Image: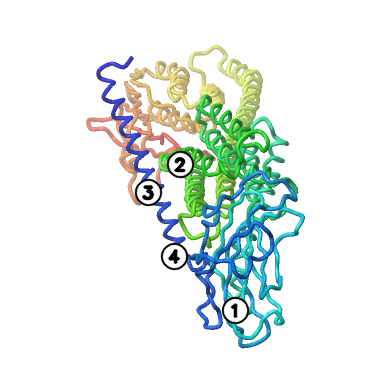
Amino acid sequence: MHTPAEAPASTTVWWRRLGHAAAWSLTGLALVAVVFLMVSLLYPVLLSEPPDDPRIAAYDTATWQMTSEPGPPAANTAWQAVSLPDYQAAERVQSTRFGLHRGTRPTHYHWYRFTVERPDDLQGWALYMPRFEDRALVLVNGVEVHRTFLPDIIQHGWNVPLWVVTPPMVWQEGENEILIRLDSPYIGVVLVSRLFVGPPELLQPVYRRAYALRIDTAQISAWMLAGLGVFALGIWAMHRTDNALHLLLGLCALAFAARQLHYFVDQPVMSLAFHWWLAVCSLAWAILFLFLFACRFYAFTYNWFQKLLVFGTVLVSLLILPGVGFDAYSTAGLVYTMLAPLGIGIGVVLIQRAWQQPGIAPLLMAIGFTLVVALGVYDFALMMRLISIEMPYLLPIGAALLLLCFSMALASRYVESLREVGTLNMSLEARVLERQAALEQTYEQLRQLNEEQALADERQRLMREIHDGIGANLVATLASVDGGSAGGGPAARALRQAIADLKLTIDSLEPVDGDLLSLLGNLRYRLAPQLRQAGIEIDWRVEPVPALQWLRAPQALHVLRILQEAFSNVLQHADARRVTVCTGAGNDERSGQAGVWISIVDDGAGFAPVQPDKRPGKGMANMTYRARALGGHLTVQPQPGGGTRVRLWLPGEAATPAA
């Protein structure tokens, strides 16, 4: 149940949908009007009008007579003048219609008489009639020159133009009489168009064009549709699980192919009653399969309506089945009228879908179906004699175009699916490449970790060897030299310095992992006893700084050597009482690059800057070299009031590896 707030919105949606349907209905009608306009522009071509030549005689009137015997009317019989085309002969008499069996003699023979002046040449003239229905016998001066049937076979030739090349000997001086007898054993309806008499070389191209429009197109269309139907059913047979569209397309194509037969088959292998039944009900089944195809294509859920249409189509097919119900030919107009709302409804839905879902497939289906509806309306008008009977039927062309559009729509969907699969494959390939790159990166990290682990293991081994070997020997040697005396001599001091350097080197071999503070902590632990022994107080103001990812064992040794040299200068030359160690992070004043700094400030005698004309000491040169090797720089400045500040700046990233 809708709330009051929802009701206006729902009403608006329905009005919008109704507006869309009305707009697209008007669009469909406009397209139908365009088709009729095109047909009217092509009227001379479709009409197969002979050229305007004085040698061609065109007859738009004739005299008509009806007999109950196959022979020509008696000489004293009254003839009735009629205008051509004439399709009201059956209405002028009580004609027996529908149901005559094979070999049954017609009850009415319709005769049309034309008077022709003798040709200038005696080579014979050709007779051309765009349309007649349905059996014709042609007499020139009482001589039979052509017939479209065999006497003992009921043939059906309602769509074939009449073409007769007469022999010269049948013509005589003065007036000549042409009699055309028409009969229709099955349907009882006859019609005749205008007659053209003239040279064969002038009329034959016109006849060939008319034959192509009426017969050849229907045959080509039937073969195309049959081939498409067999192909679609073959695809469905191989993949029945998910290809119902192919089944419906194949059945629709075969139904349209069966529909085309009555356009060109003049002697069906079956009875004419069954022949017309197939022609009428095949159109109903084709429209049904089209509707089911559209429902499947757009995933409509009109199950009850689909079942109703299937039931109605089966019922109509049974009601007009020969020997069961009504005659198919007489009820064809009613059946087509019943199919019209369904066809228009399908067209509106397809056009609406093409508007709501822009794409090649919906557009092709909408255009194809609208075109076939327009041509169907045209053919219905031709069948109901609302337009000239000399015009050809165009639905065979429309059916082929329709199924071609639907096939292309289905193919475009597969192309889109293949494109989506290609995009998905590309995406999968990209993901695989990403995974591969990640695996390669992980492998590289594992390799580096393995190398670092191997190096760490080797460092541990060297540390143990140095500590247990060289370190133990140096300690033993120091004990021997010292001899238990306080302070010892120069040799003892040298040994103590060597042991301190050795310990510092061992500390540099420990894993650092970018932690500068732990490296400084180890240095403090090693140097604190020497500073206390020298009477120097250490002020430790080390603050946390960002980790230096590039700081490894070789770089750590450079840092320790620089700081060791700075503390050594304090111990040996500064005569200081206090040393302050600070750390911090910030941008370098020179390069503006982010990094960290270490500052060592003493309150000693100070530092005299090196004169420009003198070279710095070896210790200072080594410190500067090591700082540059780390990608940083070193500054040594005297402090106001006494003392020296040594400041080491190190980059935060991409440090140049130490040599």
Q: Earlier in the sequence, mark 3 or mark 4?
A: 4
**Residue at the front extreme of this rendering:** 76
Q: Which residue is mark 4?
A: 41
Q: Nearer the viewer, residue 258 or 583?
A: 258
Which mark, residue 344? 2
> Could you tell me if residue 122 is visible in this image?
yes
- The amino acid marked with disc number 2 is Ile
Residue 627: image x %, image y %? 44, 38
Q: Which residue is mark 3?
A: 614
Give the Cα separation between the discs numbered 2 and 4: 25 Å
Q: Which residue is mark 1?
A: 198
**Residue at the left extreme of this rendering:** 641
Q: Is residue 629 above or below residue 494?
A: below
Q: Earlier in the sequence, mark 1 or mark 3?
A: 1
Give the Cα separation between the discs numbered 3 and 4: 108 Å
For the C terminus, which image quadrant? top right
Q: Secondary structure at mark 3?
A: loop
Q: Nearer the viewer, residue 643 or 39?
A: 39
Q: Residue at position x 32%, y 21% from top?
A: 577
> Could you tell me if residue 629 is visible in this image?
no
Give the Cα separation between the discs numbered 2 and 1: 45 Å
Q: Nearer the viewer, mark 2 or mark 1?
A: 1
**Residue at the bottom extreme of this rendering:** 120
Give the Cα separation between the discs numbered 4 and 1: 26 Å
Q: Residue at position x 70%, y 65% from top?
A: 147
Horizontal arrangement in the rendering, residue 69 relative to residue 559 (left or right): right
